[in-house]
Amino acid sequence: MHNQEVALIFESSTPGRIGYSLPEMDVPELPLEDLLPTDYVREENPELPEVSELDIMRHYTALSKRNHGLDSGFYPLGSCTMKYNPKINENVARFTGFANIHPLQEESSIQGALELMYDLQEHLTEITGMDEVTLQPAAGAHGEWTGLMMIRAYHAANGDIHRTKVIVPDSAHGTNPASATVAGLETITVKSNEHGLVDLADLRRVVGEDTAALMLTNPNTLGLFEENILEMAEIVHSAGGKLYYDGANLNAVLSKARPGDMGFDVVHLNLHKTFTGPHGGGGPGSGPVGVKADLIPFLPKPVIVKIGDEYSFDYDRPQSIGRVKPFYGNFGINVRAYTYIRSMGPDGLKAVTENAVLNANYMMRRLAEFYDLPFDRHCKHEFVLSGKRQKKLGVRTLDIAKRLLDFGYHPPTIYFPLNVEECIMIEPTETESKETLDQFIDAMIQIAKEAEETPEIVQEAPHTTVIGRLDETLAARKPVLRYIK
Ligand SMILES: *Cc1c(COP(=O)(O)O)cnc(C)c1O
């Protein structure tokens, strides 16, 4: 019904109906051929729907309601930190002095923007315990690649060109091995032990003279803190390798523990996750990278410097890996993150971590009775369940995720990390109330009961969405991006 309505509005084109009104032309009308090379002038008018302003408004509003966003409901997508995006961030990002600057303006006329970037770098340096930060990378994965390129340049500068291996745990996010490959390095996998943590014996086995770096997420993608982190740092450093911290899970340790203090040499942050940049649907993101002192010469250029009270771009960086993003990085997301950090303050950021961890543990304990809990220990900001018990009843994790749509929730992350069978990865975040957590828990409990009593309800879900099950692989590989009648 809903589906048809949208299609009908789109197709109810009536010749001559218009949705705009423009003032009379008060400049001489030039023939099109004088404005564009004739090759570019189309022979026929495009087939656009001719509709009123009201029709088009309803069309887009109807489409927007088919989407699930944070502002419409709970979004416990593990590893993605789908926390509330405070609206004050939007107000500040829209200040004309930020929103309307041109990328090629004189440095003297963008001192405020440069000051904000410089100050944000200083805050992130403090938060991560590193020595300097670049804001250029446009996402977490881009930050990973930038960090690895710096590590590569560092080793090359020391004549260590045989250091080509990046050690990555089997629980790692897919971007880690991908970034290593794109940076021209090779990935070696290190196993997790029965507690879900990196197996130290296996780490000792794979580390060596060819080690460029260990890439680690902490807490890892199972939501577990790597308790042997200092020993791991020691193992890798004494072999001459560097330590790379995937900071996507920083929401678990923000203002409590710092990658720099754990022995890491490079870290990326996802400002669109931990620092409330709106995300999902493809960005824009921001993936600043922090480094320890010995990697500073390799930072992307230009670097923002402060001389007296003046800010400027320093291009004189002979060892830099070069520019990784045009102009200022994704400046708008940086403004939002800066606003968030300043409005929360240090105590506010501590409370973020405490509540994120509390919420996750509360949910994990209440759900452990109904779903298998592969690692029965305190989690950090997220946790994984296994749908093994339900699978024996013929209900797969995918079915559980689809059934959650009927309750109005975005499903958790499923089938990741890869080292847990029928994995369900839940990250509630700190911004959700106890009532919301309880309602979601009730829905999960109801689904567990349905799996036992009426499995077909779960197997055939979703029942209430505009579109039922679709071929997600086909949709991702061969997307249809044009309207087809
Ligand atoms: C999200 C995420 C990334 C990648 O970050 P993007 O900003 O999506 O490129 C890397 N590692 C982990 C653990 C993540 O959760």
Image: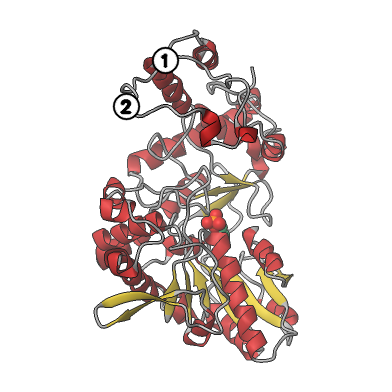
Amino acid of disc 2: Asp
- The residue drawn where x is 33% and y is 51% is 99
Residue with the mark numbered 1: 18
Q: Secondary structure at mark 2?
A: loop
SS at mark 1 in the image: loop
Find residue 320 and report its horizontal and vertical position in percent.
55, 79
Dot 1 amino acid type: Ile
Q: Is 473 drawn above or below residue 167 in the view shown?
A: above
Circle on res. 290: none
| Image location of residue 332, percent across then percent down | 38, 54
The circle on residue 26 is 2
Left or right: 303, with 89 as reference point: right
Among the two numbered marks 1 and 2 on one chain, the one whose residue lies closer to the N terminus: 1
Which image quarter has ligand 1? bottom right
Q: Is residue 48 above or below residue 37?
A: above
In terms of depth relative to the viewer, which is nearer, 141 or 406?
141
Where residue 283 appears, as percent x and y from the top left, is: 49, 48
